[in-house]
Image: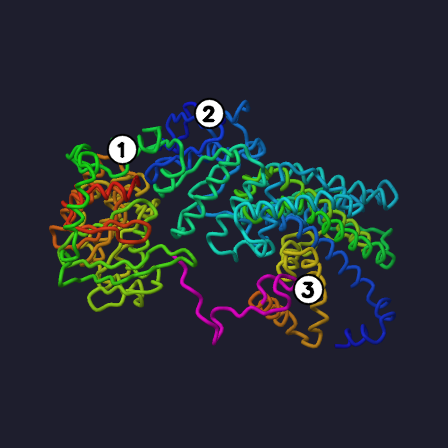
């Protein structure tokens, strides 16, 4: 509880002693927003870590080899991710639901195992040293970026584009009958999400002196973590996944007194949220808690027809 | 001509779902499209709205050719539709649902949303005002605008779907069973709505099983059967057309169409015959006793106060058009759906309370509509799976399967083929055989002739009669009325969830009221 005690009593000291943590929350918040976009348009895509890797490696390699300014590095990384997003999206977005999830996991593994761990330029699995990294200076950029990204995505969900996404998510067939070009709007969401993930990846790489090609960074583990942001926080509103990212990034601090049992406690906490708050923490119904059907004393649910 | 279809084709594998249909819909008219279950109506709609690719023929909406266009383009050209099983955007408010309907004629505002937030506010206000007007047009009170779509009562959801379709400003509105599951007063309201929209100049293509509705509002009606158009004309022409009557009521095997109810008899016959359809026919000793049974799916009441009995050794048929509530009755008897009120007893067992497994164990076994066999398993595996729950021991099981295969020699020949490769009739036999393995005392058959060619229908019914001779009591649900009446000891005609009349199979065969239950008029 020291963590929260310090946050409450000495915010300035907290800020300077937890800069990296705050940056990480910001990065995860941006990635969570990228996840929100695909989920909001009805696509269970887990491709975010691959686009983060593309963003990170592109930016760092440009910095190391070409010595270009950071802004240009990020811009190129983001554009490249967008182009790759289109190329990957063309075949993959015909898939739905869990099939799309599996295909995008395949893409994540192909980028990490097939490209990053194999090419000399990316360090062949040893990672990249990045002496130009700036672990402390990135915080303002990251937090401002988070706010901008969340704002942009929030505004997009309110317009014609967001309406189409919402319709596709709820019922593709009904969306078709309203004249909504499903493939186009899915592609827009997928590519935007790729761009945002790459942006987060580039920023994240800029924080560390070492770009680590491990599974927990750019692999399936990261994909599952990002999905958990959205599921825990709720994917109905833009802020949901961001709140999910905040909580999950803070979990080690929330349960810091638990010592060796921290993973067990974190797991129990996540399961409890899913059971009692299936729509996520930020969602319809205020802060109401759902009482599951098997809970003692709850009314038996009505029999389903057929 | 607003809509013109020429020789439209769509096959699924070997099934000719739509087989060379030509259809013309006059500008400003209400065109009906009817046909028995599986006739290809929905497939035709899916083809002309671009949901399913057209495989032959051409289609025009006014001067615009629709052939080969994707669904979103066709919608933008001005064909709006509603869906048989309501497809609203459930989590969105009623108003948002209607607003989404304006998608295709709305300017893109992505950049405006990012920049100055108020730029598009004027247009947005206009849109909201229009959406509210549309809700009013379809007869929804302003209070529903902010409510989530799936919290609305059933009838209001249907209306909301119409409002969303109107938001597209369509040239042609396709209503796919808009009155399905509605009670009489809701149906009346839907009918008024359809007439009002048409009076405002909208062309409507109406698909529905409620013949009173279709025959009442449509200027012309086209009839599909097995993917082909078999009639097209005024409601009166169509409802007295011999081919249509045959398509709806089926044929009694060797019997010819001219003995069909209403085809030969005039209306005088009704009074006489229905006078003799007295409940005195009801058996005193019944193994199945259904009393004032009412079943509902949420707000939709499918079965309204149905009372009937089945005695040991009988074949009893429940006949009636699609959507009359027949399958719901069977599913309630099997314990798959719980009744809202009333009772159903099988001997001493209360079917409204008992577990489905207990019901089967006591000897009440249902062969479901659509057969529900395991297509990838072999015939033998399908049969073995059916005995799995009985735990009779391998020898007894073997013997039982052999007995059943003797009854259906064709299944014996095909025992090692996967069930999905069997013809429709053979699959139906397999489904019945599987039912027999549970040693039923009362066998419920749900639409055994569904989708079968006439020859196969004969064979399936022959098998049913043989099973009956072996001592099994049978409760049969059929759309193919003539065929069912020919084998049934007694029958009940069901219309919109109620028993319309009852009598012996023979009496009903010659009762024109049966035709009316199917075709209205």
Residue A171 placement (x, y as % from top left): 54, 47
Say yes or no: labels 1 and 3 on the same chain.
Answer: no
Say yes or no: labels 2 and 3 on the same chain.
Answer: no
Q: Nearer the viewer, residue A20 or B303?
A: B303
Residue position for label 3: A248
Q: Is residue B349 above or below residue B330?
A: below
Label 2 resides on the chain identified as B
Q: Is residue A297 magenta?
A: yes
Mark 3 is surrounded, within 10 Å at the Cα level, by few (under 14), some (14 to 19) or many (20 or more) other residues, namely many
Say yes or no: labels 1 and 2 on the same chain.
Answer: yes
Is residue B29 shown left or right of residue B466?
Answer: right
Task: Tell me what residue is drawn at x 54 percent, y 41 percent.
Answer: B165
* Quarter assignment of residue B110: top right
Q: Nearer the viewer, mark 2 or mark 3?
A: 2
Viewer can see residue B406: no
Q: Which mark is residue B125?
A: none
Residue A60 placement (x, y as % from top left): 81, 46
Q: Main secondary structure of the magenta part?
A: loop
Q: Nearer the viewer, residue B251 or A251?
A: B251
Residue B76 placement (x, y as % from top left): 59, 33
Residue position for label 2: B4
**Number of numbered discs present?**
3
Q: Nearer the viewer, residue A283 or B48?
A: B48
Q: Nearer the viewer, mark 1 or mark 3?
A: 1
Q: Secondary structure at mark 3?
A: helix
Q: Nearer the viewer, residue B328 or A146?
A: B328
Residue position for label 1: B240
Q: Secondary structure at mark 2?
A: strand
Q: CA distance from mark 1 to mark 3?
A: 70 Å
Q: Secondary structure at mark 1?
A: loop
What range is drawn magenta here? Answer: A277-306
């Amino acid at each position: 509880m020291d963590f929260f005690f310090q946050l409450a009593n000495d915010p300035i000291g907290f800020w300077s002693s937890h800069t990296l943590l705050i940056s990480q929350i910001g990065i995860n918040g941006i990635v969570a927003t990228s996840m929100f976009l695909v989920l909001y348009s009805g696509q269970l895509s887990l491709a975010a870590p691959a686009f983060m890797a593309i963003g990170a490696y592109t930016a760092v390699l440009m910095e190391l080899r070409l010595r270009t300014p950071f802004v240009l590095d990020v811009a190129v990384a983001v554009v490249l991710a967008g182009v790759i997003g289109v190329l990957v999206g063309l075949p993959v977005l015909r898939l739905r639901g869990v099939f799309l999830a599996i295909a995008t996991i395949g893409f994540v593994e192909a980028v990490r195992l097939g490209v990053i761990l194999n090419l000399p330029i990316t360090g062949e699995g040893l990672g990249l040293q990045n002496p130009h990294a700036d672990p402390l200076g990135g915080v303002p950029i990251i937090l401002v970026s988070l706010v901008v990204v969340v704002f942009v995505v929030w505004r997009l969900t309110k317009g014609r584009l967001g309406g189409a996404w919402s319709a596709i998510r709820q019922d593709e067939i009904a969306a078709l009958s309203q004249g909504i070009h499903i493939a186009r709007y899915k592609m827009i969401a997928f590519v935007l999400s790729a761009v945002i993930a790459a942006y987060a990846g580039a920023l994240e790489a800029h924080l560390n002196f070492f770009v680590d090609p491990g599974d927990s960074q750019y692999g399936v583990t990261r994909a599952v973590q990002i999905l958990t942001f959205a599921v825990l926080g709720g994917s109905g509103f833009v802020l949901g996944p961001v709140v999910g990212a905040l909580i999950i990034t803070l979990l080690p601090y929330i349960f810091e007194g638990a010592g060796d049992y921290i993973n067990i406690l974190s797991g129990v906490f996540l399961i409890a949220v899913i059971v009692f708050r299936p729509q996520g923490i930020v969602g319809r119904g205020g802060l109401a808690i759902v009482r599951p059907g098997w809970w003692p004393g709850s009314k038996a649910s009505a029999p389903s027809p057929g | 001509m607003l809509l013109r279809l020429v020789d439209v084709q769509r096959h699924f594998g070997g099934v000719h779902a739509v087989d060379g249909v030509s259809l013309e819909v006059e500008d400003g008219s209400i065109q009906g499209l009817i046909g028995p279950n599986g006739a290809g109506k929905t497939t035709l709609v899916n083809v002309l709205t671009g949901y399913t690719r057209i495989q032959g023929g051409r289609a025009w909406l006014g001067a615009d050719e629709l052939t080969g266009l994707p669904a979103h383009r066709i919608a933008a050209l001005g064909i709006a539709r509603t869906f048989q099983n309501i497809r609203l955007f459930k989590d969105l408010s009623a108003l948002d649902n209607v607003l989404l309907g304006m998608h295709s004629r709305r300017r893109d505002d992505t950049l405006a949303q990012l920049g100055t937030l108020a730029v598009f506010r004027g247009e947005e206000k206009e849109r909201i005002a229009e959406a509210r007007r549309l809700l009013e047009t379809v007869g929804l009170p302003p209070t529903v605008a902010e409510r989530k779509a799936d919290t609305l009562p059933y009838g209001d959801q249907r209306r909301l779907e119409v409002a969303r379709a109107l938001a597209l400003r369509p040239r042609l509105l396709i209503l796919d069973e808009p009155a399905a599951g509605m009670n009489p007063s809701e149906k009346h309201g839907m009918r008024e709505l359809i007439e009002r929209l048409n009076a405002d100049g909208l062309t409507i293509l109406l698909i529905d099983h409620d013949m009173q509705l279709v025959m009442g509002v449509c200027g012309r009606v086209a009839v599909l059967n097995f993917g082909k158009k078999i009639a097209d004309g005024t409601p009166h022409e169509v409802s007295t057309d011999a081919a249509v009557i045959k398509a709806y009521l089926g044929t009694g095997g060797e019997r010819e169409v001219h003995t069909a109810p209403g085809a030969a008899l005039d209306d005088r016959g009704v009074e006489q015959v229905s006078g003799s359809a007295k409940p005195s026919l009801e058996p005193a000793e019944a193994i199945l006793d259904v009393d004032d049974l009412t079943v509902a799916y949420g707000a939709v009441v499918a079965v309204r106060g149905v009372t009937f009995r089945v005695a040991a050794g009988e074949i009893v048929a429940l006949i009636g058009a699609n959507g009359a509530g027949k399958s719901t009755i069977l599913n309630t008897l099997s314990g798959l759906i719980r009744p809202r009120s009333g009772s159903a007893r099988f001997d001493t067992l209360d079917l409204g309370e008992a577990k489905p497994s207990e019901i089967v164990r006591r000897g009440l076994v249902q062969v479901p509509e659509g057969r529900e066999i395991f297509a990838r398993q072999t015939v033998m595996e399908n049969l073995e799976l059916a005995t799995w729950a009985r735990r009779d021991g391998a020898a007894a099981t073997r013997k039982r399967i052999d007995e059943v295969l003797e009854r259906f020699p064709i299944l014996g020949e095909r025992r090692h083929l996967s069930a999905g490769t069997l013809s429709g009739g053979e699959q139906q036999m397999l489904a019945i055989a599987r039912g027999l393995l549970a040693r039923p005392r009362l066998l419920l058959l749900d639409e055994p002739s569904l989708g079968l060619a006439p020859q196969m229908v004969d064979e399936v019914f022959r098998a049913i009669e043989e099973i009956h001779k072996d001592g099994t009591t049978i409760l049969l649900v059929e759309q193919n009325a003539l065929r069912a009446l020919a084998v049934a000891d007694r029958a009940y005609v069901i219309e919109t969830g109620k028993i319309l009349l009852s009598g012996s199979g023979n009496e009903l065969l010659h009762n024109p009221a049966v035709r009316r239950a199917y075709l209205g008029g």
